[in-house]
Amino acid sequence: MKKALITGVTGQDGSYLAELLLEKGYKVYGVRRRTSTANYENVEHIKDEIEWISGDLADLSSLIEAVNKSQPDEVYNLAAQSFVEASWPQPLFTGNVTAIGVTNMLEAVRIARPAAKFYQASSSEMFGKVVETPQKETTPFYPRSPYGVAKLYGHWITVNYRESFDMFACSGILFNHESPRRGMEFVTRKVTNAVARIKLGLQNELRMGNLDAKRDWGFAGDYVKAMWLMLQQEQPDDYVISTGETHTVRELLEVAFSYVDLNYEDYVVIDPKFFRPAEVDLLLGDCSKAKQTLGWELDVSFEHLIHMMVEADIKRVLAEHKYRSEIITDVAVV
Ligand code: NDP
Ligand code: GDR
């Protein structure tokens, strides 16, 4: 039985990856940081199948202990302070976890299990300011946030450990990917949650930032398959994972609101609070290397993804507000 160690397993990607690996017959070890209230929402359904290990990306000894205990064949380093907006008010924390945390994890593997294959969750945020589109593995980086800068460090230290210590270390440069398990503050989930609440009469406006930003949005369930494929290759390498389509935040609003027969212009209010000190204007990925080498394909289109998220949020909001059930009959998609 193959063994995998996942950091960030309680997050969006970690939960889909754990599901995928359990389906494939892996023994899955999940590193979980201590929090005052445990958060298992994304992994509730597989919680008992995961072997939990307490650890924090900022604490090397806990990571060495996690690797020692699990003796994994594959390590997926998904943990991070992952919200770009939070990286300006918390640049040092973001650097400690999202940048230096990668070295901690690599050191733990180098010390306790150097033969393990290592996956680093790199990001299209490393491309930042538009230098070339579509962005591919050879496109120069120009990050635009403390988060992007931290991810760039994580990316290069992964490459460096591969070249210095002959470790099987891969970096997946993933473009935005979303799902009903996406954190509430990210733009897709913020919008689909608001659409559900507006449709159900629980909210009457949505405050947003820059509607002109363009993102290449895919489905997280498709993207975790690429992570696994990278570690099944003969040679370690870095790959862009994307859909090859880009949409503005405004288009996202149109798709989400029109799905429940609403017009976003009737509800959206522009709030300067949600504009960023430096914006990434356009992300559009070229994943032809991953398609050719890994045989990776995506199943879920942008429209399907947003519809799936709206439906899931309507169901969840309804379940949380059962007493408003008289409204249900009005919602065609449920
Ligand atoms: P989430 O924010 O949903 O999950 C982050 C995970 O990291 C959570 O499990 C969180 O635990 C954990 N974590 C945070 N800080 C620490 C710490 N100090 N020690 C241990 N664990 C910690 O992110 P996603 O699932 O969306 O993304 C996964 C990874 O991929 C991240 O590294 C992200 O930066 C990167 N990425 C994501 C993309 C996307 O579009 N989703 C695109 C490109 C890269 P807790 O539950 O306790 O908060
Ligand atoms: P991003 O995702 O920064 O691309 O990082 P996010 O969903 O936060 O923002 C996408 C774009 O939407 C614009 N925007 C808003 N964003 C938020 N959150 N809230 C708003 O109200 C709002 N209005 C407009 C933003 O300005 C931005 O242009 C995500 C994270 O998952 C990272 O961890 C990951 O590395 C990258 O994707 C790839």
Image (tube, rainbow, N blue to C red):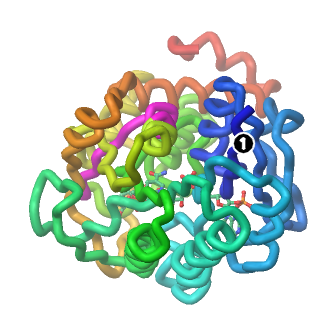
Image quarter hosting the C terminus: top right
Q: What residue is shown with label 1?
A: 3
Q: On the rendered structure, is 306 left or right of 199?
A: left
Front one among 242 and 39: 242
Q: Residue at x 28, y 46 (%)?
A: 216
Q: Which residues are magenta?
A: 213-225
> How many residues crowd around disc 1 within 10 Å: few (fewer than 14), some, or many (20 or more)?
some
The answer to which image quadrant residue 293 occupies is top left
Q: On the rendered structure, is 7 left or right of 102?
A: right
The answer to which image quadrant residue 318 occupies is top right
Give x and y (percent) for residue 22: 71, 30
Q: Residue at x 66, y 56 (%)?
A: 8
Give x and y (percent) for residue 168: 48, 57
Q: Secondary structure at mark 1?
A: strand
Q: Residue at x 43, y 76 (%)?
A: 164
State the count of labels: 1
Front one among 2 and 292: 2
In the rendered image of this protein, does residue 298 appear above or below residue 138? Answer: above
The answer to which image quadrant residue 217 occupies is top left
Q: Amino acid at mark 1?
A: Lys
Give x and y (percent) for residue 313: 60, 32
> In the image, is the residue at mark 1 within 8 Å of ligand 1 by its beta carbon?
no
Give x and y (percent) for residue 15: 66, 41
Residue 237 seen anywhere in this rendered image of the structure: yes
Q: On the rendered structure, is 37 left or right of 201?
A: right
Q: Is residue 24 magenta?
A: no
In the rendered image of this protein, does residue 125 appear above or below residue 23? Answer: below
